[in-house]
Image: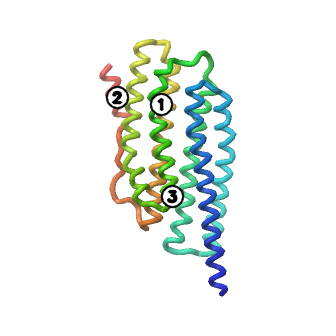
Amino acid sequence: MVEKHVWKAFDRDLEEIGRMILEMGGIVERQAWRCVESLSRHDSELAKGVLIDDDQVDQLQAEVERKSISTIALRQPVAGDLRELVGAMRIANDLERIGDLAKNIAKRVIAMDGEPPPAKLIRGIEHQNELVLGQLKAVLDAYARRSLSLAMAVWAADEEVDAICTSVFRELLTYMMEDPRNISFCIHLLFCAKNIERMGDHATNIAETIHYVVEGHPVADARPKGDTATGLAQSLQHH
């Protein structure tokens, strides 16, 4: 009877940690959408909301870590149960980093003054962000359902995100060369594009963690990666 009570308590701990992870995920999804939406609208107030959300994300990440460590110390889980807790800490860390990257973009929006740039300058960024938002939503669904197939679909899509980033870099360089008045804003957008690409990297990290939790070992294959640095260099040479 005592052992049954202990395992019920352990299950409650896991459920609470899982709930916090999904709560974090929801806030981070909102941050990732708002940061680019604020860029498109040139809306500093919307960008400030991303910064406010970041405090809650940081608090949840710290709470997931605290609860996971205390559960490991108290329950001394092994095998799959231990992987669940280690995985939760890894995922919370990646979600916190995605929130930080969204915050970086929001800070740039707040720092930029003047008239909104031509819409064509932002279309590539918007498309890139839509793709990463899709990755983030899918990987959170994969975590909620412990779906290995869904997690690996996100993992396989990482190369596409890198390719989009390279395309955005090339497009922004073209705009800079066509009209020097675009240079200042395009430099901001280059940093935004890189931040969005890194959000995709962290979503892929989460997919790899889900694989570890479900299968008990890391992904054996090398991560499919595009090379944005090479793409940028090729763009410069082309022009």
Does 220 appear above or below 52?
A: below
- The mark that comes first in sequence, 2 or 3, is 3
User: Mark 1 sits on what residue?
Assistant: 125
Contact check, label 2 and label 3, Cβ < 8 Å: no
Residue 88, x across and y down, in percent:
56, 60
Dot 2 lies on which element? helix
> Residue 166's image quarter?
top left
Of badges 1 and 2, the one in the foreground is 1
* Nearer mark to the viewer, of 2 and 3: 3
Q: Position of residue 146 (x, y in %)?
A: 48, 62
Q: Amino acid at mark 2?
A: Ala
Circle 3: residue type: Tyr
Q: Which residue is mark 3?
A: 143
Q: Is residue 12 above or below residue 54?
A: below
Residue at image point 48% right, 52% down: 139
Secondary structure at badge 3 equals helix
Give the residue type at disc 1.
Ile
- Label 2 Cα crowd, 10 Å radius (few <14 / some 14-19 / many 20+): few
Q: How many marks?
A: 3
Q: CA distance from mark 1 to mark 3?
A: 27 Å
Of 31 and 144, nearer the camera is 144
Q: Quadrant of the C terminus?
A: top left
- Image position of 10 (left or right of 191): right
Q: What residue did someone put label 2 on?
A: 233
- Above/below status of 109 relative to 89: above
Q: Secondary structure at mark 1?
A: helix
Does label 1 or label 2 sit earlier along the sequence?
A: 1
**Vertical comparison of 159 with 21: above or below:** above
